[in-house]
Amino acid sequence: MKFQSRGLLWVKGLALWRLLRPGDVLVLGLGLIVLVLAWRVAASTGDGVVIQQGGRLYAQASLRLNRVIEVPGPLGTTRVEIRDGRVRVMSDPGPRQLCVRQGWLDPGESALCLPNRVAVHRGVPAYDSLNY
Amino acid sequence: MQAEDRRMAWLAAAAVGLGLAEAAIPSPIPGLKPGLANIVTLLVLLRYGWRLAVWVTLLRVVATALLLGTFLTPTFVLSLAGALAALFTLGLFSRLKIFGLGPVGLSLLAAFAHVGMQLAVVDLWLLPGVSLLGLAPLFLTAAWVTGLINGLIVARILHVNPIPTPPVQAGVQGWPAS
């Protein structure tokens, strides 16, 4: 048998796509849809959180790791919670609790706990090719 | 029976060989592998049935882990969990004949099941608290590509070298121990 090569999808004269059955094409297509959705969901979660205390940078954190960051301030401790790719101010010693009631922050949103001089800023979702 | 045992040993040895070769390939991210040993699992399933596929896969997972020194480590658990998930997916979908699924579709489904189960194990047991959302698309993409390539390899082997014995019979064939 004479060896012929007609490109990557041909092996020894056999077109590889002819090995695909209808179900295979269906699964490939569905898989591709799942992939696109997965990338879009992952890209929509913001990249990180910046916490400032008294105007200075206190902490920079990724949204990937669930944890509670304790920020000391003049009134006491402000607790910032990161969970499942989201961030919120969990508790704050301030009298009006504005930043706590703000709940989970949207990308680009900030929560300010002014009495305790704590600011939490959630980063905008920027596609970071280095992290992927 | 002895002939079947010998066949099982040969096939498992082939799978172990592929597994070891693959361990030597450098990978930018741990866990990102072509999954070449799954070619053997799928081929065995389509040629000799579910029972032999389970045996060959379990032997492969344990023997590869012993040779690489990862037996009973988290790596081994991940490998076993992924292999079992892939195996059950293959067992299920190779019996459902509604779609006209070929080796490529089966390989793809198995690869997704493999990766999905491994991510679930990492998320729930190894690193609870770390959000794997950012890594999932990467692994799913890798699974899609490797599933397609491995499936094409299996399809080609089956095409060039047709099945010598009847493929998977309908009905449950039971666990290897039975």
Image (spheres, coloured by chain):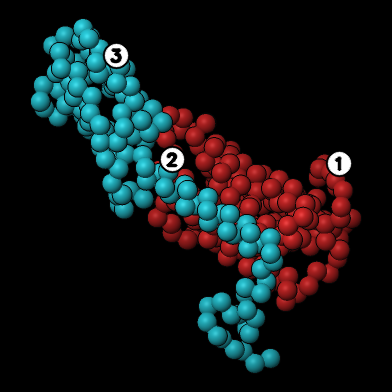
Chain colours: A cyan, B red
Q: Residues within 10 Å of mark 3 (few under 14, many from 20)?
A: some
Give the foreground label among 1 and 2: 2
As measured in the structure, the alpha-carbon distance from the residue carrying label 3 to the one carrying label 2 is 26 Å
* Label drawn at residue B133: 2
What is the number of the mark on residue B51?
A: none
- Residue drawn 73% across the image and 70% down it: B158
Measured from the top left, where is residue B60 in percent x and y?
Answer: 66, 52
Q: Chain of mark 1?
A: B
* Mark 1–mark 2 distance (CA, rounded to whole Å): 40 Å
Q: For this view, does A68 lie left or right of residue A60?
A: right
Which residue appears at 16% of the width and 14% of the height?
A116
Amino acid type at image mark 3: Ser
**Labels 3 and 2 within one chain:** no
| Numbered disc total | 3
Q: Is residue A37 above or below residue B150?
A: above
Helix or strand or loop: what does disc 1 sit on? loop
Q: Which residue is pictured at 29% across the width and 36% down the height?
A: A107
Residue that numbered label 3 is attached to: A91
User: Disc 2: which chain?
Assistant: B
Amino acid type of the residue tagged 2 in the rendering: Leu
- Say which of B79 and B163 sits in front: B163
Q: Which mark is residue B178?
A: 1
Observer-nearest residue: B75 or A118?
A118
* Secondary structure of residue under mark 2: helix
The mark that comes first in sequence, 1 or 2, is: 2
Dot in front, 1 or 3? 3
Please rate how many residues cluster around mark 1, counting C-alpha atoms within 10 Å: few if below 14, some from 14 to 19, many from 20: few
